[in-house]
Image (tube, rainbow, N blue to C red):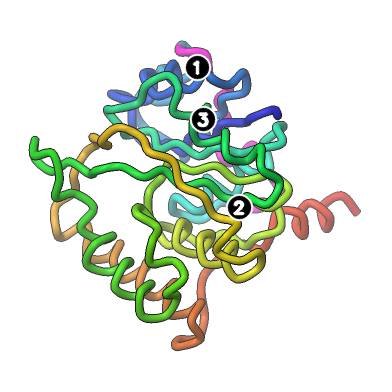
């Protein structure tokens, strides 16, 4: 099983190199998708051994849109492995073995998506992070998608997908991307196609409430759209559809 690690990055010069090195311990193809960083993110990632692509280099005929979902979508288009493993660039707890652990359940052909399960730290405390997850995503998932109530970190940025599956799915713009992928996999292949693996507590940059509010709104809209409650969801079509069109 060949793995492409996709690391979306925007101005993460302080942490991206350590994340890259941890991923290279488990995978040969580590790709940083740089979303026009203005700091040394690209240089740091390249020096650490990553294959660095500016998001404008991937599917160059399509102008990029702001947001994390865009970087992940383009990362899928750039992936060469049988599996894509997404890892956030801002985590401070990256360590060798996490990519291997996330990909291991995919040896089972019935598993298509593997989510990390961990505690979220907050201001030095062992737990209390993941406020959008606990206050927005989980209540809505319990209400509209009860089969997913057992997913510990539905919005977590560390997860693995079969590349063939990732290329069949639309990618929601911005921070709704994880919720969208989780629901879409469950609806197409059943919640049994989703596995979880335990990783150490996640440490990263905690955002202030004023930044979390718009994230929560996007996540809520994505879940409600998938539930058929609201109309319209800004998203990219499946990579297979786009690459098929651009190759003709």
Residue at 62% x, 18% y: name it.
28
Residue at 71% x, 36% y: name it.
82
Q: Earlier in the sequence, mark 1 or mark 2?
A: 1
Is the residue under label 2 in contact with that under label 1 (CB below 8 Å)?
A: no
Residue matched to label 3:
32
Is the residue under label 3 in contact with that under label 1 (CB below 8 Å)?
A: yes
Residue 55 drawn in magenta: yes
Q: Earlier in the sequence, mark 1 or mark 3?
A: 3
Q: Reply above or below: 160 against 210.
A: above
Which one is in front in this view, the residue at disc 2 or the one at disc 3? 3
Magenta span of residues = 48-62
* Mark linked to residue 63: 2
Occupied quadrant, residue 79 = top right
Residue matched to label 1:
46
Task: Residue 180: give x, y in percent of width and height.
Answer: 50, 64
The answer for how far apart the CA atoms under marks 1 and 3 are is: 8 Å
Q: Earlier in the sequence, mark 2 or mark 3?
A: 3
């Amino acid at each position: 099983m060949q793995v492409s690690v996709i690391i979306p990055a925007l101005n993460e010069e302080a942490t991206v190199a350590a994340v890259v090195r941890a991923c290279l311990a488990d995978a040969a193809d580590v790709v940083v998708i740089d979303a026009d960083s203005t700091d040394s993110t690209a240089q740091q990632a390249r020096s650490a051994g990553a294959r660095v692509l500016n998001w404008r280099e991937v599917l160059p005929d399509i102008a990029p849109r702001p947001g994390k979902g865009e970087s992940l979508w383009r990362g899928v288009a750039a992936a060469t492995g049988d599996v894509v493993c997404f890892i956030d660039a801002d985590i401070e707890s990256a360590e060798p073995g996490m990519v291997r652990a996330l990909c291991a359940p995919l040896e089972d052909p019935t598993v298509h998506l593997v989510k990390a399960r961990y505690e979220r730290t907050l201001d030095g405390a062992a737990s209390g992070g993941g406020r959008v997850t606990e206050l927005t995503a989980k209540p809505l998932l319990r209400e509209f998608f009860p089969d997913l109530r057992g997913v510990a970190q539905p919005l977590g940025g560390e997860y693995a997908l079969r590349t063939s599956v990732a290329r069949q799915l639309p990618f929601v713009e911005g921070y709704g991307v994880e919720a969208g992928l989780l629901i879409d996999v469950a609806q197409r292949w059943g919640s049994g196609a989703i596995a979880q693996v335990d990783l150490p507590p996640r440490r990263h940059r905690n955002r202030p409430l004023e930044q979390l509010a718009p994230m929560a709104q996007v996540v809520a809209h994505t879940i409600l759209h998938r539930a058929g409650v609201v109309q319209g969801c800004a998203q990219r079509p499946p990579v297979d559809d786009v690459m098929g069109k651009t190759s003709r």
